[in-house]
Structure formats: C-alpha cells, structure tokens
Image (cartoon, rainbow, N blue to C red):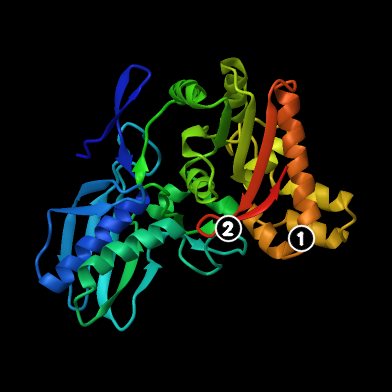
Amino acid sequence: MFEMYIESFGKKLRCGYTTGSCATAAAKAATYALFNGKSLDYVNILTPNNINIEIEVHETNFYEDYVECLVRKDGGDDIDVTDGIIIGARVKKANEFSIDGGEGVGRVYTDGLSIKKGEAAINPVPRLMIEKAVKEISENERFEVAVEIFVPDGELVAKKTFNSRLNILNGISILGTTGIVYPMSEEALKASIALEISQKILYSKEIILVFGHMGEKFAKNLGYDEKKMVIMSNFVGFALETCVNKGATRVTIIGHIGKMCKIAYGCFNTHSKVCGVRLEVIALEMALLGYDMEFVKRILNEKTTDGAVNTLGKGNEKLYQNIAKKIKSSAITYIHGEVDIDVLVYKGTVDSEILAKA
C-alpha cells in the first residue's frame, strides 16, 4: 500500500497515485520482465515532482513475443471512479520506441485536444513518464520497445467520466500532471489555501495565484517568485477574498485560457461541474471584434480552448488582450477594487505560451 500522507483539517489522509503513474509502473515492470525473463513484485517510478513511489505489480504474464503486467489503481483516500481498476501494459521488442492504447483506453476523435486526433488518450505528461521509465530499462539493450497501455474495465468506467463530451471514446484517459493523487474535501482544500496565503503574506503583500502544479511550473519558468505563489485549485473567488482579508496589496492571477475565460464570464469556481463556459467567451469577443460569423461558429464548436487557439492561429493579439482585460475587470469587480489585480493568460500544457497580460 502506498504510504504517503497529508494532514487535512486535522485528519491524516493517505495519498494515492494517478492512472498515469499506474501505466508507467506497468510499462516499466513489463519492460524489465521482457529483457530479464523474470517478474517484479514491486516497481519504483519517479513522478514529475521528483517523488519516488513504489507500486505493486498485480500480475505478470509472459507470451511468445511480449510481456504483460498489471497494476491496480490506488486513489488513497481520494476515491474516484478509477479507484481499484486494473491498468496494464503490454511490451514487446521493436525497432523504435512507441506508445499506444489498447482496450479500455479512450481514443481521440476530434481536433483541439493536447493529444492528436486518432491517438490514444494518454496525456502528454504520462507519455513522458512512460517513455522515461521504460528507457531506464531498455537503454543498454539492442532493441527499443513498443508499449501498449490497456484498461480491462476502461470502457465501462469511461461512462462515468466527461470523456464522451470531449469526443474521447471507448475508454478512459490516462491522466496526471504530478503522478500523485492528493485527497482533500472542498472544505479542507479551502482551509489549506487560506493557510498558504497567510504564510505567503508574511513574505510579501503581493500574492501570485495559480490553478495547479502546471501553472506553478510555468510561472516559475517565467521568473515569478515561487515564495509568493499559492495554488488555489478551482476556488478563485475564495482565494481572492482571502487575499483581501489577509492584507494583500496586489494579486497576480496566472492561468490557462480555459480556466481564465470562466473568470471573464464571472464564474469564480472554475470546476467543470460548476461552470462549463470557456469557448463562449472567446466566440463572443470574436463577434464583438467583427470576425466572420462562420469562423466564430467554428471556434464555438471546438472541444477545447487550446483547440480554439490553434485554429485561430497567429495574429489575434487584440482578441486575447480584450479577454485578459475582461478577466481583470471581473476579478476587480468581485473584490470591489480592494486589491490591485494583474492577470496572465497562457495556452498549452507541455509547451505553454503567453497569450496576453493585463
């Protein structure tokens, strides 16, 4: 059992690991078995946050030209629809390295996602994790490997997710930007946000709010001071109110355009179950700027904001600047102008780029 814990609202909660970590562990164990002719009971992987985790190998099967390893997903005390499911990897020798999805792993049937149309729904960070872990084993061998990730109950479990709305069909997505699942209730999350803001205020009256670890990493790469950063998750309004109450003088909100568009719309809890408005904000601003209405409709029908940005292409600085100004105005209105607000909007997940500042 994965033994990593956090304190949350006076309770000790056990962390879990993501579907991406499971797929990585299964692929690494199968690669080891393929080249060594013997199985592992446990396998160690390194998460993107440089945390080593040991994952039990549930089962190893040897076949004529490939090895198959199975891992059971452990969500810790954060139980979701994927907790307890089996995630497997089949690995065989090949002339070049490749990753694909088998049964139970969704496939992308639309443009505009971080994964290309037609590819398996294995997100960029898990893909990098799998490749790195596998090549630790295969780098001194004469052959590369072909990896196939599969989830026996994936198609059934996917019916309880949002995948079909994104045109990801026939299975779940392999996800995770940190490799670790951190369990927290909404109440506990807000308490931790408030505590972190209280601590950061002691260092500086200027606070930087980001949505998650990807945004935090991007902000650090841009040179923003990590000691001022607070991860607010989806609780934008709560974080802003807390900054005001704790005496902040300036707040910089740094976020992906998908989340930030919701703020422009006036939504200060950005969870998809609370607010799904994103593309509507881009489309409205395009219409106000006089874009061709057929093109506006095309953008509105994209599945993701990254897809919309890619379809828009270059030369849309005024569009993004106007959206950034509306995000800033919306945030200032929310806190009644009690704190100065700056915003930075970016696109992408792995290769992120600034779209606008205000």
Q: For the N terminus, give its image quadrant.
A: top left
Instruction: Identify the residue at the far right of this view.
Output: 290
Q: Is residue 264 left or right of residue 269?
A: right
22 up-or-down from 181: above or below = below
In the depicted view, which residue is nearer to us: 325 or 281? Answer: 325
Which residue corresponds to the image point at 32% horizontal and 57% vertical from the top-left? 23
In the drawing, does residue 240 fall left or right of residue 153? Answer: right
Nearer to the camera, 241 or 57: 241
The amino acid at mark 1 is: Arg
Q: Residue at x 36, y 53 (%)?
A: 20
Counting residues from the start of the chain, the first of labels 2 and 1 encountered is 2
| Discs 2, 1 touching: Cβ within 8 Å | no
Q: Residue furthest left?
A: 38
SS class, disc 1: helix
> Residue, x 67% and y 40% (percent of image)?
343
Q: Quadrant of residue 174?
A: bottom left
Q: Which residue is mark 2?
A: 167
Nearer the observer: mark 2 or 1; the answer is 1
Q: Is 286 located above or below residue 212 in the figure?
A: below
Instruction: Kindly indicate the quadrant of the structure image that contains residue 27.
Output: bottom left
- In space, the residues marked 2 and 1 are separated at their CA atoms by 16 Å
Image quarter of residue 149 = bottom left
Q: Position of residue 103 (x, y in %)?
A: 38, 63
Please give the residue where the numbered disc 1 appears in the rendered image.
298
| Residue 305, above or below 226 | below
Q: How many numbered circles does the render carry?
A: 2
Q: Amino acid at mark 2?
A: Asn
Closer-to-camera residue (299/212): 212
Residue 60 vs residue 203, the one in the foreground: 203
